[in-house]
Image: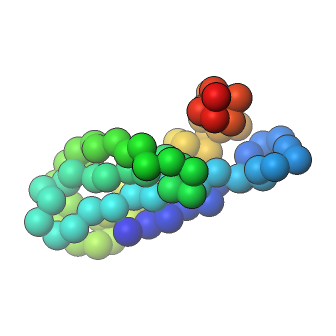
Amino acid sequence: MVTARIPKKQETLHHVHYARKYITSRNEEGNILIIPQPERSDVYLVENWGKMETFDDFLEKALARILEDKKESDTGNEEGCGKGCS
């Protein structure tokens, strides 16, 4: 499991970051459980990241995904509380 706390580009009164959890296990054949807002919601996504033979493979792919999520957040495409909390 990898938990990322990704800072938002603009600070708000309530949230200066958002969290994501990426979960897998040895026998999942590349399937990843992604929990976009673990503190606020039970919503999750399942993705397949392809073959991963070591924990380092998972970490490398998770880091790449975290950086993609941060870039998405910086451009304003990340779902904010205005959409997700209504």
Location of residue 12 by image quarter: top right
Locate residue 11 relative to residue 83 in the image: left or right: right
Residue at point 33%, 61% (across, down): 23
The residue located at (15%, 59%) in the rendering is 28
Left or right: 12, with 78 as reference point: right
Residue 27 is at least partly visible in this image: yes
Residue 86, percent from left and from top: 64, 28
Q: How many marks?
A: 0
In which quadrant of the rendered image does the N terminus lie?
A: bottom left
Given residues 31 and 63, the one toward you in this image is 31
Above or below, 73 relative to 30: above
Please name whichever residue, 65 or 5, is drawn nearer the observer in this view of the structure.
5
Q: Residue furthest front?
A: 86
Q: How is the image coloured?
A: rainbow
Q: Nearer the viewer, residue 85 or 46?
A: 85
Residue 67 visible, this angle: no
Tell me which residue sits at (50%, 48%) in the image: 41
User: In the rendered image, which quarter is residue 84 located in?
Assistant: top right
* Image quadrant in which you'd find residue 71: top right
What residue is at 81 percent from the left and 49 percent from the top?
14
The furthest residue to the right = 13
What is the x, y in percent for residue 58? 32, 63
Instruction: Please state if 80 lies on the left or on the right of 11 as rendered.
Output: left
Residue 42: x percent and y percent?
Answer: 43, 49
Residue 25 in picture, x, y percent from top left:
22, 67
